[in-house]
Amino acid sequence: MYLKWSRDEVEARLKGIMQSIHHACLDAAEAYGTPGNYLNGANIAGFVKVADAMMDQGIV
């Protein structure tokens, strides 16, 4: 499908994606005992996302 977005729409979508990533990192870090640690939060959030997808597909 060919979509054409304005510059403002691209910026708004990217901002939303980045905010979602930011919150996922902070929430994961908080939930697993390292509040404020973006590196741990990013790694944990990524791992959980992959693990959830594998479980949904019945791999694990």
Image (spheres, rainbow, N blue to C red):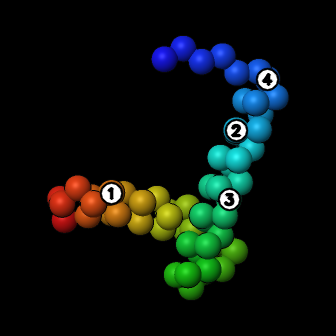
Measure how far apart labels 2 and 3 are at the Cα level.
Answer: 14 Å
Measure how far apart labels 4 and 2 are at the Cα level.
Answer: 10 Å
In the displayed structure image, the side of residue 8 where residue 1 appears, left or right: left
Q: Residue at position x 35%, y 63% from top? A: 52
Q: Are marks 1 and 4 in contact (CB under 8 Å)?
A: no
Instruction: Name the residue that disc number 3 marks.
Output: 22
Instruction: Name the residue that disc number 2 marks.
Output: 13
Measure how far apart labels 3 and 1 are at the Cα level.
Answer: 20 Å
Kind of element beneath mark 1: helix
Kind of element beneath mark 2: helix
Q: Which circle marks residue 7 in the picture? A: 4
Query: What residue type is disc 2 on?
Result: Arg
**Residue 38 shows up from this direction:** no
In the displayed structure image, the side of residue 31 where residue 16 appears, left or right: right
Query: What residue type is disc 1 on?
Result: Ala
Query: What residue type is disc 3 on?
Result: His
Query: What residue type is disc 4 on?
Result: Arg
Question: Residue 58: percent from the left, percent from the top?
Answer: 18, 60
Q: Nearer the viewer, residue 44 or 23?
A: 23
Question: Residue 37: percent from the left, percent from the top?
Answer: 65, 72
Which numbered disc flags the more N-terminal residue, 2 or 3? 2
Which numbered disc flags the more N-terminal residue, 1 or 4? 4
Kind of element beneath mark 4: helix
How would you rate the neighbour count of disc 4 (Cα within 10 Å): few for under 14, some for 14-19, many for 20 or more?
A: few
Which numbered disc flags the more N-terminal residue, 4 or 2? 4
Q: Residue at position x 42%, y 60% from top? A: 49
Q: Quadrant of residue 39?
A: bottom right
